[in-house]
Amino acid sequence: MTSLKWWQTAVFYQIYPRSFADGNDDGIGDFKGITKKLDYLVRLGVDALWLSPHFPSPNWDCGYDISDYCNVAPEYGTLDDFKHFLSEARKRNLRVILDLVLNHTSDEHPWFLESKSSRDNPKADWYVWVDTPPNNWQSCFDGEAWTYVPERKQYYYHYFMKQQPDLNWHNPEVKQAMWDAVRFWLDLGVDGYRLDAIGTIFEDPNLTPHSVPMNLAELRRFSELAKTDEEKKLKDQYWADMFKNQWGQPGIHELMKELRTILDEYEGDRMLVGEDDNIDYIGNGKDELHLVFNFPLMRTEQITPEHIRKNQQERLTQLDKLPVRGWPCNTLGNHDCSRIYTRFGDKLHDAELARLNAALVLTLKGTPFLYNGEEIGMTDYMLTDILQVKDTMGSWYYHTIVTEMGVHPEEALFRTAEMTRDKNRTPMHWSNKPNAGFSPEGVVTWLPINPNYREGINVFEQEQNPSSILNYYKHLLKVRKASPALVEGEYVALQEKEQDYAAFLRRAEKQTVLVILNYTEKRLDLDFSDAKDVKGKNLHTVFTSAVRSPADHTAQKLTVAPFEVFIAEVTP
Ligand code: GLC
């Protein structure tokens, strides 16, 4: 039906391996578990999987500190388990992309162990070494960005934790070694990579200090306490200023071009999606990344019709300006941020808003990325004990504010539970059995299970319940797949001043659909009889989240229920 590539028509589903499915009953997800759940993913209706890092790692940053790029973490299985998973995914027509962490390795990676052992070993220059800290740069996770190593009597640079030393990408041997790792998995048949934190790969060559009058912990605390608009504005300014010399520096585009050349050597349209929202990383539209995430869509306290329109207007205009038109990529959640259900809820209509926002991601133009668990309405889980914290940036913050700033441990725990990413990484709920069916009863899971699995937030119960959010996702995914307009159509905003609802067309050669997302609890009487492309036409319902008969409507008089998602084909 289309000349688009697979990564433009596919719906991606992010698997966080540690929390997805436990196949060997040890409380930690693994490949055996993932493989067993592939049929579930097929039933759900997604087309491609993105795996967060599955490589050996000491897990200071939950797998984003890699100690071997060409292997599988023992807790997730063996390389053979991976190959088996990949071939089972293939059999089901599921594509698979992996996470590629270029900026840094683990401090336990043999490259770093060698590099830090002396100043004149063969890998001495593989990381960023200095004699004394040249500036006040901060690590975005845990304080100072320069850490001392007695063996070399020198400091190394790390944008993230001190267990994540930055590679020196100016060294051609580093590149060679990393490109070998990239080829290793491409040779095994993976379909591409999600590129981690590409903005951090190079630093300001002049090492210009930041100008913020506080360090990282103080800035976090300042942000928590910011109440007035002025304080909030200042806080945003400080965050931008603190890291601006460690981010988005020259060199990345050349590197992305090299990486793209490698991918293009392979058959089968291998792809790259960057963890960045900067459209510049798409290059001229065919020489750097295939996709970058539309993070500005989720970078808001509340999803509103106005926000959606403004976001689409800006993004699509930028993408359209590229020499080869860029393709959008939308998401509202991942392993680094509060879950959609919690984050964009209002505590009164969370269920309705979760459905609206799912429909938003699945009906906007572009490739959608879903995060495991959102399809059953999983929520954030606030840890209740500091000993439960696995996200090291959380425990660092707790100890810093308690010991250096005198914050009461109770408040510090509350703040930590709110800021750690553990809250949105708890194990998937497969059933209403103990441990949510993730692990057998009695097993201690790596993070606590959110007890709300007993309240219907689990796959087993939702699969039997026609009105569950899971069946809602399945239905929407089916509708999307069957609709050329939703897959490939242009986005055309309608009635652009309306605050209550977002209305837009998706217009393809063979089909036009109208999408209405009512973000209020009001019943709305709408009239599209003046709208371009709808004038004088009929509306044939293809999807509704409301209880209504699937009748045809005229464009002139369309009643939309509170929080309704309404999708209709525009017919003559
Ligand atoms: C990315 C990952 C995040 C990780 C960081 C450092 O932002 O998504 O989870 O902590 O990079 O690798």
Image: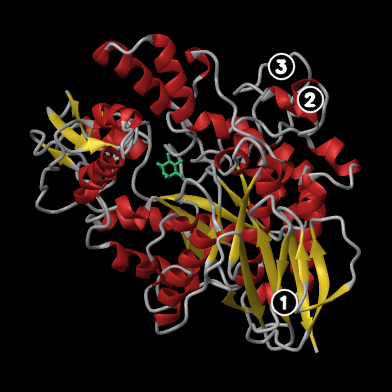
Q: CA distance from mark 1 to mark 2?
A: 38 Å
Q: Which quadrant holds the C terminus? A: bottom right
Mark 3–mark 1 CB contact (< 8 Å)? no
Q: In this figure, which residue is indicated by the disc labeled 3?
A: 443
Determine whether the residue tagged by mark 2 lies in a helix, strand or loop.
helix
| Quadrant (top left, top right, bottom left, bottom right) of the N terminus | bottom right
- Camera-side mark, 2 or 3: 2
Q: Vertical placement of 321 versus 178: above or below?
A: below
Of the two numbered discs 2 and 3 on the same chain, state the one appearing first in sequence: 3
Residue 14 place in picture, x, y as percent: 61, 49
Three-letter amino acid code at the position of disc 3:
Val
Residue 391, percent across and down?
46, 27
The CA distance from mark 2 to mark 3 is 17 Å
Q: Residue at x 66, y 33 (%)?
A: 29
Q: Position of residue 13 (x, y in %)?
A: 65, 52
Location of mark 2 (residue): 454
Q: Nearer the viewer, mark 3 or mark 1?
A: 1
Tell me which numbered mark, 1 or 2, is placed earlier along the sequence: 2
Of badges 1 and 2, nearer the viewer stands 1
Q: Within 10 Å of the Cα at label 3, are there few (<14), some (14-19), or many (20+) other Cα atoms? A: some
Checking the image for residue 513, the label placed there is 1
Residue positioned 74% across, 44% down in the render? 35
Counting residues from the start of the chain, the first of labels 3 and 1 encountered is 3
Disc 3 is placed on an element classified as loop
Residue that appears at 57% across and 44% down: 344
Residue 507: which quarter of the image?
bottom right
Please tell me in which quarter of the rendered image ligand 1 is found.
top left
